[in-house]
Image (spheres, grey):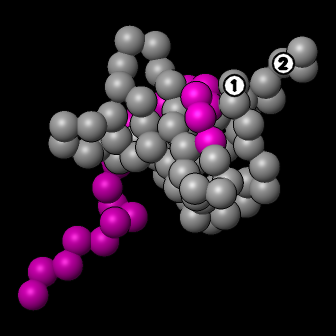
Amino acid sequence: MKSTPKENKVYERCTAQVKFYSRDKGFGFLKRPNKDDVYFSQSTLERCGIRSIKENDTVDFDLIPVPGKGGKAQNMKIVANAPKQ
């Protein structure tokens, strides 16, 4: 039986802004200019040590391709907080 460790996969590193996030629903989406939105889950935030995130925060992440969709984010890191209004 062949095993392919996930650690050996190389994913595209991207930057995007938080479009939507619902702690109650446990997921959110990132918006990238001229590209499909990217999904992320509450468990991804927890694994990355992110305790709070809000709309328009800017994040770096690894993009996991999902056929027919915008992909899924992992290894997220907040690089800029949304401007205060």
Whether residue 62 appears in this view of the structure is no
Identify the element where label 2 is drawn. loop
Residue 20 in picture, x, y percent from top left: 59, 34
- Distance from Cα at disc 1 to Cα at disc 2: 8 Å
Q: Nearer the viewer, residue 2 or 20?
A: 20
Amino acid on which the number 1 mark rests in the picture: Asn
Whether residue 14 appears in this view of the structure is yes
Quarter of image, res 48: bottom right
Q: How many badges with numbers are in the image?
A: 2
**Crowd class of label 1 (few under 14; some 14 to 19; many from 20; radius 10 Å):** some
**Crowd class of label 2 (few under 14; some 14 to 19; many from 20; radius 10 Å):** few
Looking at the image, which residue sits at the far left?
Answer: 1
Amino acid on which the number 2 mark rests in the picture: Pro
Identify the element where label 1 is drawn. loop
Residue 80 in picture, x, y percent from top left: 77, 28
Q: Range of the magenta residues?
A: 1-21
Residue at x 50%, y 48% (from the top left corner): 40
Residue 63 in picture, x, y percent from top left: 40, 41
Residue at x 42%, y 30% (from the top left corner): 37
Tell me: residue 21, above or below residue 80.
below
Q: For mark 1, what is the residue? A: 56
Task: Give the label on residue 83, or none.
Answer: 2
Tell me: residue 76, above or below residue 16.
below
Q: Is residue 63 left or right of residue 46?
A: left
